[in-house]
Image: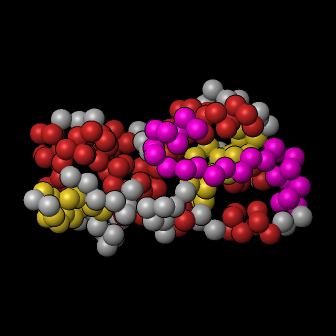
Amino acid sequence: MLKYLISSRPKRKLLSLFLTHPEEKFYIRQLERLVSEPVGAIQRELPKLEKMGLVKFEIGNGRKNYFLDKTCPIKEELKSIILKTIALGERIKELIKKTKNIKYAFVYGSVAKGEEDIKSDIDLMVIGNIDEIKLQEKIQQIESKISRTINYTLMNIEEFKKRLNEKEPFLMRILEDKKIEIIGSENEIRGFN
């Protein structure tokens, strides 16, 4: 889906890297390794990202270090799109689409709020009637690919509805806060269709 909005594969990969690692700085050769794209393609895309106001650079140790411009007004919207499509969301969908019975999955916490830092983990809520051991294996695969820790909470559908009806504080706080929906929607899981 994102490839139709951003046709350049190197640009998509760079955006994904910068938006999911907002506190880190990267030099050209490091970017080449991390996004698996040729240096020439990266060097063509970085000035475009600078002009868009998404990326800045500073010179240190004789090289340019690129990083996310946190003042970019569309940073959060882009991050949400990236997470839903090619970054975390796509990896989660990719790995758990074979796992049946997941009705709702979303990212919450500092990542969804745009308040994460380099040490932030990713909070993931998964609702469905699935085997936790299989889910844990898939989460570990995702963690190794994105180099971030994922803390997940798993609830079966009955437990979710029970906690929802009881207005359990933990669940209510999460549902009322910002979240990035990966699979399903809150209305579907609540039964509103």
Magenta span: chief secondary structure:
helix
Confirm whether the magenta stretch covers residue 161. Answer: yes
Seen at 37% across and 42% down, the residue is: 2
In the displayed orientation, state which residue is furthest to the bottom.
71
Residue 68 among magenta residues: no
Tell me the quarter of the image containing the N terminus.
top left
Answer left or right for 159 relative to 47: right
The answer to whether one can see residue 4 in this image is no
By what rule are the colours in the image chosen? Answer: secondary structure
Please state the horizontal and vertical placement of residue 148, each as a whole percent of the image. Answer: 49, 49
Q: Is residue 87 above or below residue 122?
A: above
**Horizontal side, residue 116 vs residue 167: left or right:** left
Residue located at (26% from left, 54% from top): 26
Residue 8 pos. (x, y %): 24, 40
Among the 4 quarters of the image, the one containing residue 102? top right
Q: Which residues are magenta?
A: 140-165
Position of residue 18 measured from the top left corner of the image (x, y, whole percent): 33, 55
Name the residue rendered at 15%, 40% in the picture.
39
Q: Position of residue 96 (x, y in %)?
A: 61, 33
Query: Quadrant of the rendered structure where residue 71 is?
Result: bottom left
Question: In front: 176, or 17?
Answer: 17
Q: Nearer the viewer, residue 88 or 21?
A: 21
